[in-house]
Each structure stands twice: as C-alpha cells, then as structure tokens.
Image (spheres, helix red, strand yellow):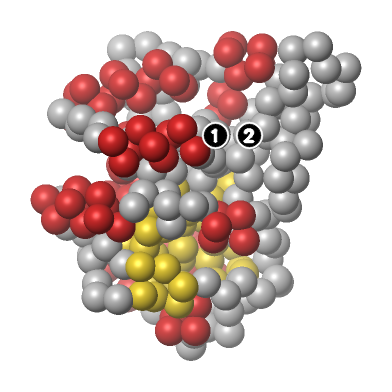
Amino acid sequence: MGDQIRPLQPGEYAPAFALPSANQEGTVSLASLHGHPFLIAFFRGLHCPFCRRQVGQLGGLQPALRAAGVETVAVINTPVERARMYFGHRPTPALLLCDQDCSTHRAFGVPRAEFLPEDSREQPAWPYRASMAQFEAARINPTGELPEALHPMAANPVLNAKDGFELNEADHAIIARHPTQLVGHFLIDADGIVRWVQIEARDGPNSLSIFPNAAEMLAAAGSLRH
C-alpha cells in the first residue's frame, strides 16, 4: 500500500539530488557536497512547529558539527519563496534546501504514514499500513512545552499560536499534499556513503516529533573519525 519505501541504510550510497537553497544563491546538489561529510535532515513544511524547532537546533549545532568536519543541511517541504520569507526573519547557519514535492524525502526512503481503510482486514504495520485507531489514540509532548500530551494534530496549532506563526496559502497547500510525511536524519561521509540514520516514530505515532538530540548527532559525527 502506498509508498512502501525503505529508508537508506548505513553502507548505502546517497542518491543524487539538486534543490534550491533558501539561504544561499542557486541550487545545491549532492555533487556539490561531495568530498565533505554532511548531516542532512528531511523535514515537514514550516507548518510543523516541531520541525521548525529542530531546524533551529541544527543551526545552533552547526559550529560544533563544522568543527568535527561535518556540514549541516536541512531539507524543508516548503516552496523556496515561503522559506526565504520565514528564514529571512529567523536566519540560521545551517544550509537550507527546499523540496516542495518531497522528492528527496522519498529518494532517501523517509516514510510517510499510509492509513488502512476502516474495513480493511490487513494487519497494521506502522507507518506503511497504519491503523487510524492507533493514530487517533496517539498523544505527544516531545518538547515539554504543551500543557499536557495532546494528539499530534492538536499539538501543532497550540505551538503555532504560542510562536505567533500564521499559516499562509503555501503552508495549507503543503499540508494538503503531504499531510503524513515523517522526518529523517542521515549522516553522509565524504564519499557519499550513508553512515548513520535516524527515522522519526519508528515504533509508532506516540514518538512523533521526537528527533535526535545534540549529543546523538555529535556522537554520530564523531564516529566518522574512527
């Protein structure tokens, strides 16, 4: 059912890509990054407050990662014009790339949840054959900012209101096209080989929006030296 794509695994080559940048001129490709290790993270659109926070964390971690010889790349499921507008007010040293079609998300195998029909007799297998009942029962509070654990679809508007973030037409269009995209982090070495992978919510929707922390990403970067 749906895109039953498998995330890239350590030892596999990263696929070629070329995406417009929101904070540099022109397009950035895998070829242009070749020869330099980089951490690349694939996010939902700007409508996701947890993704915005993780992009900010990546930006804050960029000096330490660069000191370890690793560049930092964030791919956002947002049109480049929208991203330039937003990050023009909230600049980050991380390299920001835009993929409004999630084509690179899929090329790297970052899953998106697909829900079984209500009358299906198939056995649920998150996230490719997800049960709507399982999703509806999910409650999250990954950053501890919510007054209580909330359903993922209820958590977003609470934090967007807290941030003063107002969704525009471009954001609503992305939500309509890619409502269940998950997030993935990949560490790529200088030869273009995947060395470390972290996929959001591997064990189910209760771990949605739990992303690798600074210590985990720095440890992964440090492993390239061994």
In the image, 165: left or right of 144?
left
Outermost residue, left side: 89
Query: How many numbered discs, if any?
Result: 2
For numbered disc 1, what is the local secondary structure? loop
Mark 2 and 1 residues: CB-CB less than 8 Å, in contact?
yes
Q: Is residue 166 left or right of residue 189?
A: left
Amino acid at dot 2: Ala
Q: Residue at x 61, y 55 (%)?
A: 106
The residue under label 1 is: 180
Residue 188, percent across and down? Answer: 54, 72
- Is residue 123 left or right of 226 when viewed as pictured? right
At label 1, which amino acid type do we have? Answer: Thr
Q: Nearer the viewer, residue 150 or 63?
A: 150
Q: Residue 160 location, x and y as percent?
A: 26, 27
Q: Name the image quarter holding residue 107.
A: bottom right
Residue 151 in sight here: yes
Classify the position of the N terminus by image quarter. Answer: top right
Q: Disc 2 to disc 1, how far (Cα)? A: 5 Å
Q: Is residue 205 left or right of residue 47?
A: right
